[in-house]
Image (cartoon, rainbow, N blue to C red):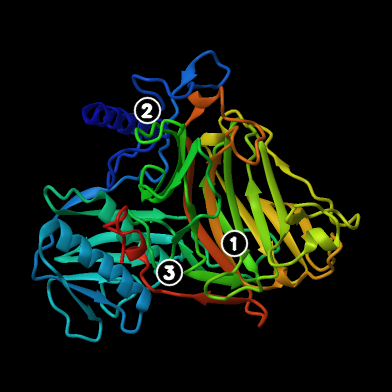
Amino acid sequence: MKRARKILSIIAVLAICVGLVACGGSTETASSDLSSSGSGDVEIRPPYDDGSGDEVEKVDNDHVFEFEKSDLTITKDYVIVIPAGNSEAKLSAKDLQEFYADKFGFTLRIVTDNTAETEKEILIGKTKRADSAKDMKESDLKVSVKGKKLVFDGGHDVTADMAVGKYIRNVDVKDGKAITFALTTDFRTTPDVEGLEDYHYKWGDEFEMDGFDHTKWAFRLGMSGSPKNKVTYQKEVLDVADGRVKIHAISYYDPEDPNVMFMSPYSLATNETMNFLYGYAEIRARVPFFQGAWPSFWGGTATSLYPRDERWHAEIDVFEIFGTEDTVVPNIHKWYDDYPYEVIYNTGDVRHTTYKNNTDKYKKRTYVYENPENLDWEYHLYGYEWTPTELNFYVDGEKYCSMDIVNSWDLEPDMSMFHLPQYSQFNCHVFVDDASYTPNLIHGNEQMLPACYYIDWYRLYQKNDGKSKIWVNTEDLSYKWADRYPDAKK
């Protein structure tokens, strides 16, 4: 029996690996070539047909870029130089320090640019050294070799950090030669959305380093599973690699529980790391659109950094995809916790109410893509603006829906929970027939799995208006998930 279980476990692992390759991802990381076939020996999903009669191989080449290999080799006598007082550059320096310690066995010193200049230096950001660029655009980054110096430049701390992350992921550790490249990114300190010019970058993650940064992200059971759908935070369904968060819902065989058919991830959330009040939050993401897939970007009234009123709490759904091929659905809810709403208002055992239109001004609608043929392989921008009066929802910079958060839509007039801090979270579930909510079931459509939800970045912008606020906890929380993430970024 033990031997049989071991064989079945191996088969399950192989099935997961084949499935993840079908997402256009890879079972390896830190590679400059992220392309992979959309189908292997086992066809996981049908190839895309553009109507020309020729099958088009689906390949996710996002984050593939050209770089050159130099003759410079970093040795243990190098030092990392950062601008004095720049805490963001210090974090980037620690990432690079840990990389060389882990891969090459030596620990580089980190010093500020107030120290005397030496010949062998690695410069990060806008240091006082002459070799650091001082006038780059905020969206630009560059890694160059100048004499014996390795220089990481960026027009902003975020792009300088991106340069470090891209470097680490693409260096060939076999020969240790430094690589050089220059890129223009889509990073902006104000969102590239008409009407939101007064917002400024406050917090975010570009996901350039492999493995989650657990000073920014936590796992929480925001959506429960079912006997057929196992919920976990294992790397098979929740990981950071190739410059993206990779969230998968997969077919899964559990040798210990034959009832399990699927595996879905815990919520990836900021509930313990970042809560905010008002602002514009946006992601660039590749979202699965097919029958049975249930990806989402949502938030709830804060629970950790800003404890909530337990009487009821608010939920903001930036989007959910309810197993359709083209439709993005936003919504907001009131969840009644320690509050007898069902008794007072005779609603039975329903614990929540959903937004309804109260005026002609606020007409709730969805966003429907016009050309969805290859949609679950495309990257798009999804965002929402949260103000003291309304919520506005965007796709690719287009505002398509507004919701009033001043006037109540149900019999409880209180709307205060929509004016308390919230956290953000992401999920990728599947609709199974033994769950409490069962539209567009995955059953009969399992060949479309894995559902691949890839997030390129998350950025939060806020106004300097005295009303918008942010709470940040920088404690490293990786110890909570050390059994699955022993290499979690510190």
Q: How crowded is mark 3: few (under 14 residues within 10 Å), some or many (20 or more)?
A: many
User: Which residue type carries mark 1?
Assistant: Ala
Find residue 37 and name its label.
2
Marks 2 and 1, how far apart at CA: 33 Å
Q: Nearer the viewer, mark 3 or mark 2?
A: 2
Residue 408 on image: x %, y %:
84, 64
User: Which residue reaches farthest top?
Assistant: 53
Instruction: List the residue tagged with mark 3.
Output: 156
Q: Which of 123 and 376 is in front in this view?
A: 376
Q: Residue at x 66, y 54 (%)?
A: 317
The image quadrant that residue 333 belongs to is bottom right
User: Is any atom of residue 404 visible in this view?
Assistant: no
Q: Nearer the viewer, residue 18 or 378?
A: 18
Residues under numbered marks 1 and 3 in contact, where contact means CB atoms less than 8 Å apart: no
Q: Which residue is drawn at 52% across and 66% down?
A: 271
Residue 252 on image: x %, y %:
41, 33
Whichever of labels 3 and 2 marks the residue nearer the N terminus, that label is 2
Find residue 281 and name its label.
1
Q: Is residue 90 above or below residue 443?
A: below
Quadrant for the C terminus in the image: bottom left
Quadrant for the N terminus in the image: top left
As helix, strand or loop, the secondary structure at mark 1 comes to: strand
User: Which residue type carries mark 2?
Assistant: Ser
Residue 348 on image: x %, y %:
80, 52
As helix, strand or loop, the secondary structure at mark 2 comes to: loop
Q: How many marks?
A: 3
